[in-house]
Structure formats: structure tokens, C-alpha cells
Amino acid sequence: MPFNIETYRKQKRIVVDKALQQVFRSGSNCPKTLWDSMKYSVFAGGKRLRPILCLASAEAVGLPQKESLRIACALELIHTYSLIHDDLPALDNDDYRRGRKTNHKVFGEAMAILAGDGLQTLAFEWVSNPVGYGPRYRKNLPPVVNELARHAGYPGMVGGQVDDVLAERQKPTLAKVFSIHQRKTGALLASSVRLPALLAGASRPKLDALTDYGWAAGLAFQIVDDILNETGDSKALGKKAGSDRERCKMTYPAAIGLEKSKAEVERLTREALRCLRPFGPQGRPLIELALYMARRTN
Amino acid sequence: MPFNIETYRKQKRIVVDKALQQVFRSGSNCPKTLWDSMKYSVFAGGKRLRPILCLASAEAVGLPQKESLRIACALELIHTYSLIHDDLPALDNDDYRRGRKTNHKVFGEAMAILAGDGLQTLAFEWVSNPVGYGPRYRKNLPPVVNELARHAGYPGMVGGQVDDVLAERQKPTLAKVFSIHQRKTGALLASSVRLPALLAGASRPKLDALTDYGWAAGLAFQIVDDILNETGDSKALGKKAGSDRERCKMTYPAAIGLEKSKAEVERLTREALRCLRPFGPQGRPLIELALYMARRTN
């Protein structure tokens, strides 16, 4: 059966954007500047990779799409808040993101800090609302929320961001860059495929397979990010190419060179695909997403 | 029966501090600087008002104390993260808090932003962990988490903080200061008494009574804060007295004068006490806490 990943991504992006618009439908109870600031960054043209992985994983485990949408939105809200805070002057001090001015350049530093805080809370509010789920899935909500918090927090994303800050200007080693990538981006990417399976009450072998897929494909994605920052085109990336090297960031190319980094992407992608064998045709979207994550040029 | 609120607060503080030490027991999976930074602010000598209100509310509705401790900790973690972010140079730019250097003065701005982020996530991780609750309470977890997120987020605390920032140097009016206080501090204080009742599955009339108590006592607490900032002693407060006036902050004394502010504290406290009548002797700790909140001198 022909499968076009570009069509799939486009279709799922529309679904995700509609769900995110749902999140930002009301806002009557929110200071307007805060609402505008949160919306500015959520609708800034991201790839929606985490939510799309979430929807694809829901297909793989037979979770109805509508049951997975709150998790998908929460993942994107958490990802967006982390970008806003990472871009702040005290952290990466970036003026542009995805070709547009960063949040604090438009709304000021105070509002950017608070918009990030508000997006994190909104993620937990949205994902934990029991009325958003069918009765048979509600009982699985606490572990879903718990894992999202763990993977987004100090053992995961926030911890990785701290390691990344502390490692700047240190000599890059494979062990260090591996650990930073797994925390900073890997944990939330792994959650993107694990959470729908947890909500669905998927079997242990299926959950384990998705976990392995998530970590492998997630790391490959991040190494491709490092490679593109080294070799890519600023315009296609929407941010300055070569900025990692300028800042002496901990990257795969800096630790093991470009060629070995590319080989590692290939190896991880093969590993990710192997994990999906038990899912049969239902795993097809996740397979194609892993291939897309490895081959993308922006 | 004699009841000594000072003894009660001291005893419950010990219980809460022990529970918070439990939260920070491991940390093997956390960058040390981040862990130190989070702990620095959590164990900085706060009053633990929100967790103590939570424990007292648990008593009122007959929820076993151990079932309320995760909520108590989550409330304090959220409160602490909000203080760290409020103190940042881009917001209130405070160097001291409770007589100690603020987080960013010790750990730097980047780490203070990330410690705040990590504490917020940790709050949701801690409160949502199903293994921390007896089987009969687990099913009530999603609405507990959902309300905590809502009251800590844009409709509550974060929204209030934004309004507070935007209102600086505007003419103070009672309507504006009421709205800021209700969001910025009122929402989380109301949650402190509501969440144990939600977890316990308390009856609607009891939940409503606790809600009214929480909003009234919470607002009284915040007006006393305003009054003490105007009239209090810097040393007893652990921060600079008169700083609100210097910054043209929106406060009750600025909006309606000192005498009317004091009368409002009295009125709100009477209202809070009236709400507790249906609870009989089980409501005693909440009564005494409302009186303490109105009469405190620091």
C-alpha cells in the first residue's frame, strides 16, 4: 500500500493544530498579553513532531485518535515552554527561532518567563482533565501525567538543559553528549510514543518496543539536528547554522566527527525500525516517521 | 479543649519538612547544581502555610494525613518555584528573600530559571504518582491534578503575576488589587484547602464551605502581607519593608488606606470562620489558622 509520509505529516499537523486551537479557544480568564505571548510561540510554525509521534503511536496500539489529542497537545505545550526559556538572554540568548523573533524579543523577558511557566501549567491542566477521556481510559491518567512530569522535569528535559548549560566550553566526549541528548530531547520524544500506550493500557512487550523505538529514533533526530547545525543552510533551518560550534556546544559532530555521526544516525534508525516489527501494518506511520527524522534537511 | 496554634504549626511544619525531605531524598538522577538550587529555595525557612492549610483541611474532611502529604508537598514546590521566578532581575529583581540571598544571587540567573521550571514539574510528578495513595483515593487524582494546574496557571497564580507586573505604576483601585490578589495568591491558597477535600471525595456542601473559607482567609492573608510591608519591620519580615510602595505596587493600603484594609481583614476572617461551622471540632485547626493568618506580625 502506498504511504506518503509528507501527506501523513501534513494531515496530522492539521489535526494537531486544530486541537491546539481548541486549547487556546477561550482565554477569557487570562491576561491578554500573557495569552498573546503563549499563543505566539505555540503557533510559530513548529514541526509538531512530538504530537505527530503521539498520534502515530496511538495508531500502533489501537488507541482512538481523539483519546490521544490531549497528550499530543500537552507534549507540544511543554516543548514550546522549554524553547521560550532556552532562548532567554540568561540561557542561549537567541533572537530568532524558526525564522521569527523569539518570545522575549517580542514580549519582553518578564512576559517570556511567565508565558513559559503558564504553558507548562497549561500542559498539565490539559492532559489531566478527566472529562477529555473515555471512561475506560481515565483510570490510566495518573501514570500518564506522572511520566510526562518525570520526562519533562529534572530526570529528563530540565536536567538535560542544565547539563547542556554546564557543559558549554568543556571538551566534548561521546558519553557526555549522549547523556545530554537523551535527557534534553530524548526523554520527551520517548514519552511521545510511550504515553498513548500507557493510556491505552498496552501490553508490556508493546510498551517496551515503543520505548526502545522512542529512545533510538529520538537520539537519531537529535544527532541530525547537530549535523544540520554544522552543515545546513541558515535559511532552511530558520536559525543560524554553525551556532553550536560558535558556542562550543556539546554535539555529536564535535565529539566523534561528521562521518561517524551520520553512521550513528543510520544505525539508530535501523534499530528503531526493528523495534516496530511486532506492530505489523499499524506500525507503518512510526516507521515512516523514523525514516523522515533521519533524512530531513531542516 | 485547649488548642495552641503555635504548637500545631510547629508540629505540622515538622511533618511537612519531613515529607519534603522525602521528595529530595534521591536526586541521583539530577545534575547536582540543579538539585542544590532547588533544595536551597525549598528549605529556605518558609512558613509552610499552604501545606499546613492542606493538612488542616484533611483533618476537617477526615482524610488520613499520609494521603494528604503529596498534595502538601506539591503546593509548597509550586509556591517555591513562583518565588524563584518572581525574584528574577526581569521581574521583581529582589536580592533577598526570607533574610537569605535569592536563588539567582547564589546560583545565577540561568540556574534559577531552570530550578523554577524543575520545581514546577516536580510538583506535578510528586502529586500524580498513583503509588503514593490508597486505592480508594486514586480515582480522584485526575481532578486534583487538574485543579492544581488550573489554580497555579494562567487562570490563577501565573495570570495574577502577569497582572501584577502590568499594573505597576498604574493608579491602584480596589477592583484591580482584589483581582490581582485573588489570582496571584488566593487561587493557590484556596487549592490548599480544596484539594484534600477533592481527594477525599468530600460532599458538595463541605467542598463549597472549604472553598469559601479558602478564598476569604487567603485574601485576608494577602492584605495582611500588604499591611506588614507598609508598617512592618524589615528584620522580622526578612525582606525590605516599604518595598511595595517604592515600586508603586498594587496593594490594599495603596487602594483604600491602612484603616479600611485592617477592617477588611477582620471582615474576611469572620467570614472564613463562619464557613467552618458545619465541621464542628474537626474544623478547629482551620479556624485557628485563619486567626493566625489575620494576626501574624511577619
Image (cartoon, coloured by chain):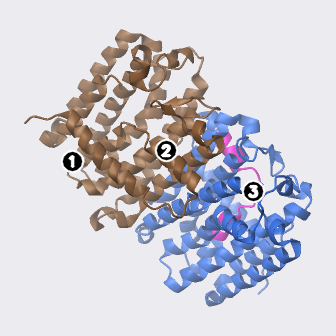
Chain colours: A blue, B brown
Task: Give, as a three-letter code, the residue at label 2.
Answer: Tyr
In the rendered image, is residue A133 in sight? yes
Task: Give, as a three-letter code, the residue at label 1.
Answer: Glu
Q: Which residues are magenta?
A: A36-54
Task: Give, as a three-letter code, the residue at label 3.
Answer: Gly
Q: Is residue A52 above or below residue A61?
A: above
Q: Are marks 2 and 1 in contact (CB under 8 Å)?
A: no
Residue at 32% x, 36% y is B214
- Left or right of B72? Residue A29 is right
Task: Classify mark 1: helix, strand or loop.
Answer: helix
Q: Which residue is mark 1?
A: B59
Q: Which residue is mark 3?
A: A46
Of badges 3 and 2, nearer the viewer stands 2
Task: Classify mark 2: helix, strand or loop.
Answer: helix
Q: Are marks 3 and 2 in contact (CB under 8 Å)?
A: no
Q: Which residue is mark 2?
A: B40
- The disc, 2 or 1, on the residue closer to the chain's N-terminal end is 2
Q: Is residue A47 magenta?
A: yes
